[in-house]
Image (tube, rainbow, N blue to C red):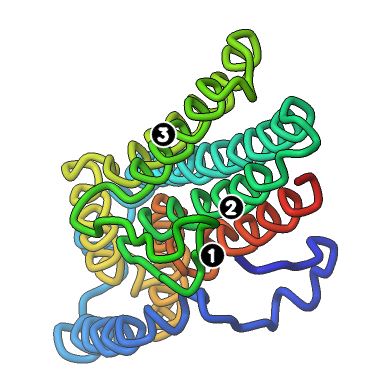
Amino acid sequence: MINYNPKEWFTFIFRLHKADTVRKLFPMFVALSIYSGIIAWLELEVWKLSANSEIKNISLMHGLLGFVISLLLVFRTNTAYDRWWEGRRQWGTLVNSSRNLSIKIQAMLPASNTAARAWFKVMIPNYAYSLKNHLRKTYIAEEMEAIPGMPDYSPDLTKHVPNQLAQLIMNKIMELHREGQLSGDQLIILNNELQSLTEVCGACERIKNTPIPFSYSVFIKKFIFFYIMTMPFGYVFSLGYLIIPMIVFIFFVLASLELIAEEIEDPFGKDANDLPTDTICGNIRQHVGELL
């Protein structure tokens, strides 16, 4: 995720970064420039159509459809941003649950049981890292700290890794309960935080695995394409060869909104505008370490 100062307007205008849609759309800009130039040349120089030609009525169609396409893009952008924000809320819940679980374990365990505290100090951040990598469909062993008493442990990568670590945490809690280190009432208090771990995982999986319906995505792309491709026919009489930069700019605006929506609707990857899950995991490790 890009950290920035939202008040620096002048800097934003001239700043290019990895997520800049200009770089992704540049081949289309060239193609549209050539296409618009050819249409303008044919209508003005070859066919010599007059400004009163019926073909200019296409501009009326664009005026009517402009309102429709704006509604579609607003829907698309809002849907994508809702997914991004819901992902951020879920990771905020994971941060809070990790802190609360650490605070409660620190307060509930006997002062002499430093081994159990060291175990949770490793396992709680490990769960956060495993969830981050699970959502990215990868596994980075270097990010996982060795578990005290289980130095050779490695999760089964053919199965759900966060679930395996959550199961280890629950098993440890129950073991402490059987040993008399935690009472039944304390077990009930800890249950909410333990349950929250898998609930956050499930919510993030729901966001990642349920993209915008295929029909919506295809229709919006087709609408933008035909809207842009028919535009030179109606506006060339009033703009002449200036239709070339105008078509490129309008396509840039419409297509950029679609590309931005595509990027942020899956907020758990490594794109510039995705959630800073690496930073969040690092903060969880730091804060849990301070508490335990």
Q: Is residue 115 left or right of residue 7?
A: left
Q: Nearer the viewer, mark 2 or mark 1?
A: 1
Q: Which residue is mark 2?
A: 125
Q: Amino acid at mark 3?
A: Ala
Tell me the residue at 22%/88% (across/down).
Answer: 38
Q: Nearer the viewer, residue 47 or 180?
A: 180
Q: Is residue 19 left or right of residue 25?
A: right
Q: Amino acid at mark 1?
A: Glu
How far is mark 2 from mark 3, CA to CA?
19 Å
Q: Which residue is mark 1?
A: 145
Q: Is residue 287 left or right of residue 91?
A: right
Q: Position of residue 41 (x, y in %)?
A: 25, 89
State yes or no: discs 2 and 3 in contact (Cβ < 8 Å).
Answer: no
State yes or no: discs 2 and 1 in contact (Cβ < 8 Å).
Answer: yes
Crowd rating for badge 3 (residues with CA inside 10 Å; few <14, some 14–19, many 20+): some
Q: Nearer the viewer, mark 2 or mark 3?
A: 2
Q: Position of residue 279 (x, y in %)?
A: 64, 62
Mark 1 vs 3, N-terminal side: 1
Q: Position of residue 143 (x, y in %)?
A: 51, 69
Q: Is residue 103 above or below residue 267?
A: above
Q: Is residue 70 above or below residue 188?
A: below
Crowd rating for badge 1 (residues with CA inside 10 Å; few <14, some 14–19, many 20+): some
Query: Disc 3 on helix, strand or loop?
Result: helix
Tell me the residue at 23%/91% (across/down).
Answer: 45
How far is mark 2 from mark 1, CA to CA?
9 Å
Q: Nearer the viewer, residue 210 or 141?
A: 141
Query: Disc 1 on helix, strand or loop?
Result: loop
Q: Which residue is mark 3?
A: 203
Q: Nearer the viewer, residue 104 or 83?
A: 104
Crowd rating for badge 2 (residues with CA inside 10 Å; few <14, some 14–19, many 20+): many
